[in-house]
Amino acid sequence: MAFTLITRSLIIYLIVFLLLRLMGKRQIGEMQPFELVITLIIADLATIPMAETALPLIHGIIPIITLALIHFILTFLSMKSVYLRKLINGKPVIVVNPNGIDHKSLKRLNMNVNDLMENLRGCGYFNLEEVLYAIMQTNGTLTVLPRSAYAPLNASNVGIKVENASLPIILISEGKVVKENMEIAQINNNFLVKQLGKVSLKISDIFFISINTEGKMYIQPKTGEFKVIETNYQGDGKW
Amino acid sequence: MKRIIIIIVLFVTLIGLATFEVIAVNNLITNLEEMATNLQSEITDNKENVETTLTSVKEVKNYWDSFEDDLCLMFNHKDLSTITDTLSRLYSYVGNNDYDNAIAEVNLLKEYAEKNRHIMGFNIQNLL
């Protein structure tokens, strides 16, 4: 019996894992209501045939596949039609506008002012006067557009010229050279050894290295502080 | 495109499985019911010849045993063992010339077969 249970659990796990991977990578908090419902039911369905050996495994698998199918169809429909998207996912609701709290919208969302304030605080706004718009998204998260006076400053506001941001690529991770990334970045071992030589380190001493398109290399040795060095590397950032 | 292919594959798999199940279960249960009806008349009409009746019961039992493993993929195993137990008792009653109980077991067999046809079927009672 134990072997049967182990095997059945493995099969169910693999099927649910595969289907959830196919269903996408969204976190629970980011799911649309229909996605959350399907995920919860699948989780519940999976446990029944796992432990009840008198039930054919297929009695658990068929409903799971059916639910995954429904998920794919609803996702497909919501991608193809704006009208169906609104019907399936709902639409974002403005809960705070320039005039203040829209209590009718709150009521429609089954939210109270405390819920709203909690969400606003989660977004970093503790006073309602700082908020120009707050929008409850279809996945249940609140997004906030602050009034200009309370918006965070950025470089363009104060006319400062800043370097372009660049995307780093990991060359050594947990002490292992990531060969795939080395090829993508067109960097060889000699280059790494040479750069590490500048800070008196060897590849075997390294825990983590990344390099960005501007040639700035972040080096984290296995022991000691991290170092950032400038190199002559110029990447195209196509990774 | 990938999503459409997944949808089509899943849909076809489900419909295929469901259709196969309906046809296979229906055929098997119909055959079992026919065999049980024949057995009933044989037990009633042929009380003197135990060996012939026992052979017929054995045939029904073999027929059932040959499908039981496959049916485990579709039926609740407890429902299957009820039919297997009934056939075993039937064999035993016929062997001991206990025809009244044998007839009762045949009737039970028919009842279980009908019940399973209903449970496995696509009908309003199962839907609601």
Image (cartoon, coloured by chain):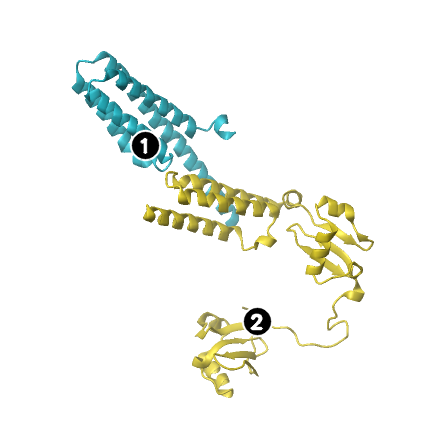
Chain colours: A yellow, B cyan
Q: Amino acid at mark 1?
A: Ser
Residue A204 horizontal/vertical position (percent): 43, 80
In the depicted structure, whether residue A146 falls above or below residue A177: above
Badge 2 and badge 1 both on one subunit:
no
Residue A197 is at least partly visible in this image: yes
Q: Quadrant of residue B102?
A: top left
Q: Quadrant of the N terminus of chain A?
A: top left
- Determine whether B73 is above or below A8 in the image: above
Q: Chain of mark 2?
A: A
Can you see residue B1? no
x and y percent of residue A140 in the render? 65, 51
> Is label 2 in a helix, a strand or a loop?
loop
Taking the spot 61% from the left edge, 46% from the top edge, the residue there is: A33
Work out whether residue A190 or residue A52 is closer to the camera in this orientation and state it. A52
Q: Is residue B59 left or right of residue A114?
A: left
> Where does the image place residue B61, in percent across and percent down from the top left?
25, 27
Q: Which numbered disc covers residue A237?
A: 2
Check the picture and name the quadrant holding the C terminus of chain A.
bottom right
- For the residue carrying disc 1, how many other residues have a C-alpha within 10 Å: few (<14), some (14-19), or many (20+)? few
Mark 1 chain:
B
Total labels drawn? 2
Q: Position of residue A178 (x, y in %)?
A: 46, 72
Residue on which disc 1 sits? B81
**Residue positioned 75% across, 72% down in the render:** A156
Secondary-structure class at tag 1: helix
What's the CA distance linking mark 2 and mark 1? 65 Å
